[in-house]
């Protein structure tokens, strides 16, 4: 399965990925409209981290042995049978935050305004392109095959 | 591989997880489930939620067992004899591999007069919740014994049902086993905005319309909920000569003292990585994990349980709380941030340069990063001073400790 990876040595913390993510998950999918009409109610599905000169954007790793799926008491967090991605069904979520407690990357976010539903990267399920990867001017965000799969292919 | 005949006692998360793991690798092996649940595939932690849809309440949809080609027996398993499970209705179910996923049982103290009365309930399964809902109709007030995880859920449940709630807790603070004094007081204040709360107090007698508590006061109540905790269900194990002591003892393959019998979930006593010994940890994620490990090993795929530790996420009348690990213990170092005004509290307990416990109240975002650091026993000496910083995140985790999941292949 292909995943989004970051290369911290290329990231300049320009936040274009964050904007692209917000817009891609807005209703209108148009930047001005999204910011004017929906903005405070939109939560990006990635986290930009900065510490001194270091920065990167990180989003769901779609772990093979996903602790968030193990912890979810409603079944909202699940493995998508088709794409193998870790998917979140907002209809089922009750906002108990068990997933937030379990994700070692801290990339599942609370969406407090939208009831209590947690949001996370959905690998742009509505779109054909990955918004954050597409927006990154430096190729700090890349889409690549995960290591495990590559190893398997070598065998 | 020979034709296995897998039998699972229990139909909750440990059982479901075992079935999913088995079926993802073996579509053919025979699986039979014995359960005394009349309502199947519901989520236990949601029994006290009133305003959720049917879809939310069911952990897996109702066709889960049939879809996975699982034969069901709705009955109580009484004991194991040779390679068969004996059911209450006299049936005899043969197995080649057996999984005990029988969960926990509510603890009911026997030193309270009147505890066996018809107005006293526990809250640990679907049936309990239905009975309470029915009984609480047109009632005015209730008393909850115990202010832990289930006690607080019971309090919210009965408050939503329209009853006046009083909680009686033996310790000097709510969630006494996982909160410290400061956070305990903070949470107690929050609870008191919503219900009456007696601390350092116990119930001495339950009568039809009132409770007598240890300070001599009498509280008028219609019903009582006993929520002092759960204990592993080891009835069948003990009757069948399987080693059990505060939980059915299992090894890293979730195998009990009998070679073809496994145990997982609230009933099992497995390795606790922080305590360094076996113990029962009755929480959902562990039941899920152990069920999956048992599933693998039952079909001959050798998989090891690395061990787990206590953690919990609970909402106290809108105030989110996450506790991780040995959160009420004292470490070599403690990193604490207490923001009284904004009802926020953060505490990280460090021992031998490893985080062994944490308390997060109010702001719980990204708590999982700490969970990961505890689990992997990451040496935090180089970044522990960053733990309380506003921008604390995965970036603080030294590169050599970062998970393989974040490293891309060369392109
Ligand atoms: C009100 C409440 C709220 C909770 N909230 C949380 C939470 O927020 N987070 C969290 O991590 N955990 C929570 N828990 C704990 C969590 O529900 C348990 O850890 C989890 O359900 C354990 O799963 P299990 O499969 O081991 O056992 P259980 O869910 O206890 O299921 C046991 C199964 O065994 C069956 N069974 C037992 N004995 C027999 C027998 N003799 N014959 C046939 N069948 C039998 C039962 O019918 C049942 O199907 C909560 C628990 C309760 C009660």
Image: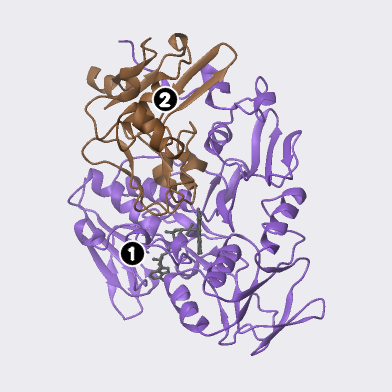
Question: Is the C-beta of the residue carrying label 2 under 8 Å from the nearest atom of ligand 1?
Answer: no
Residue at 38% over, 37% down: A65
Indicate the chain coloured purple by its letter.
Answer: B
Q: How many marks?
A: 2
**Residue in view at x 26 percent, y 35 percent:** A125
Q: Where B37 sits versus B41, above or below?
A: below
Across and down, in percent, residue A136 comes to 36, 15
Residue lying at the far bottom of the rendered structure: B208
Q: Quadrant of the N terminus of chain B?
A: top left
The image shows residue B170 at horizontal and vertical percentages of 74, 67
Mark 2 belongs to which subunit?
A
User: Disc 1 or disc 2, which is closer to the eye?
Assistant: 2
Residue at 68%, 44% in the rendered image: B342
Residue A24 occupies quadrant: top left
Near-viewer residue (A108 or A38): A38
Label 1 sits on residue = B54
Compare residues B208 and B8 and report the one nearer the observer: B208
Residue A142 in view? no
Q: Which residue is mark 2?
A: A18
Give the structural element (helix, strand or loop) at label 2.
Answer: helix
Percent x, y of residue B340 = 74, 45
Q: Colour of chain A?
A: brown
């Amino acid at each position: 399965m292909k995943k989004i990876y970051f290369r911290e040595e290329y990231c300049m913390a320009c936040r274009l990925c964050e904007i692209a993510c917000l817009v891609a998950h807005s209703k209108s999918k148009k930047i001005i409209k999204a910011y004017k009409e929906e903005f405070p109610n939109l939560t990006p599905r990635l986290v930009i981290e900065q510490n001194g000169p270091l920065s990167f954007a990180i989003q769901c790793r779609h772990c093979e042995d996903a602790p968030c799926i193990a912890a979810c008491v409603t079944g909202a967090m699940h493995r998508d049978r088709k794409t193998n991605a870790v998917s979140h069904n907002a209809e089922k979520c009750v906002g108990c935050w068990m997933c937030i407690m379990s994700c070692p990357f801290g990339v599942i976010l609370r969406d407090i305004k939208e009831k209590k539903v947690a949001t996370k990267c959905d690998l742009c399920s509505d779109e054909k392109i990955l918004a954050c990867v597409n927006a990154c001017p430096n190729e700090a965000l890349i889409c690549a095959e995960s290591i495990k799969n590559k190893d398997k292919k070598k065998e | 591989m020979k034709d296995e005949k897998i039998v699972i006692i229990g139909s909750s998360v440990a059982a479901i997880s075992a079935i999913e793991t088995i079926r993802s690798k073996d579509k053919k092996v025979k699986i039979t489930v014995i359960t005394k649940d009349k309502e199947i595939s519901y989520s236990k932690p949601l029994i006290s939620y009133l305003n959720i849809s049917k879809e939310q309440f069911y952990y897996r949809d109702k066709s889960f067992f049939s879809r996975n080609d699982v034969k069901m027996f709705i009955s109580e398993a009484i004991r194991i004899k040779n390679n068969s499970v004996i059911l209450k209705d006299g049936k005899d179910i043969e197995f080649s591999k057996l999984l005990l996923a029988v969960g926990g049982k509510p603890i009911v103290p026997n030193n309270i007069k009147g505890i066996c009365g018809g107005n006293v309930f526990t809250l640990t399964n679907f049936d309990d919740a239905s009975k309470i809902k029915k009984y609480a109709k047109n009632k005015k007030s209730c008393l909850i014994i115990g202010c832990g995880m289930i006690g607080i859920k019971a309090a919210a449940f009965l408050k939503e049902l329209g009853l006046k709630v009083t909680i009686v807790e033996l310790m000097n603070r709510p969630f006494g086993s996982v909160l410290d004094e400061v956070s305990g007081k903070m949470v107690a204040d929050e609870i008191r905005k919503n219900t009456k709360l007696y601390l350092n107090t116990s119930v001495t007698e339950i009568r039809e319309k009132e409770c007598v508590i240890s300070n001599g006061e009498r509280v008028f109540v219609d019903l009582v909920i006993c929520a002092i905790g759960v204990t592993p269900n080891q009835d069948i194990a003990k009757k069948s000569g399987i080693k059990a002591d505060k939980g059915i003892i299992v090894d890293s393959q979730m195998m009990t003292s009998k070679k073809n019998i496994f145990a997982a979930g609230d009933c099992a006593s497995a390795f606790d990585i922080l305590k360094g010994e076996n113990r029962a940890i009755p929480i959902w994620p562990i039941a899920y994990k152990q069920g999956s490990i048992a599933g693998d090993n039952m079909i001959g795929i050798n998989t090891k349980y690395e061990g787990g530790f206590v953690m919990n996420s609970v909402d106290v009348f809108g105030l989110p709380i996450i506790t991780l690990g040995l959160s009420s213990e004292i470490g070599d170092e403690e990193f604490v941030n207490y923001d009284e005004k904004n009802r926020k509290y953060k505490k990280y307990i460090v021992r031998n340069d490893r985080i062994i416990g944490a308390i997060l109240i109010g702001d719980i975002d990204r708590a999982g990063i700490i969970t990961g650091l505890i689990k992997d026993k990451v040496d935090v000496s180089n970044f522990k001073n960053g733990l309380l910083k506003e921008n604390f995140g995965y970036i603080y985790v030294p590169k050599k400790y970062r998970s393989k999941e974040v490293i891309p292949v060369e392109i």
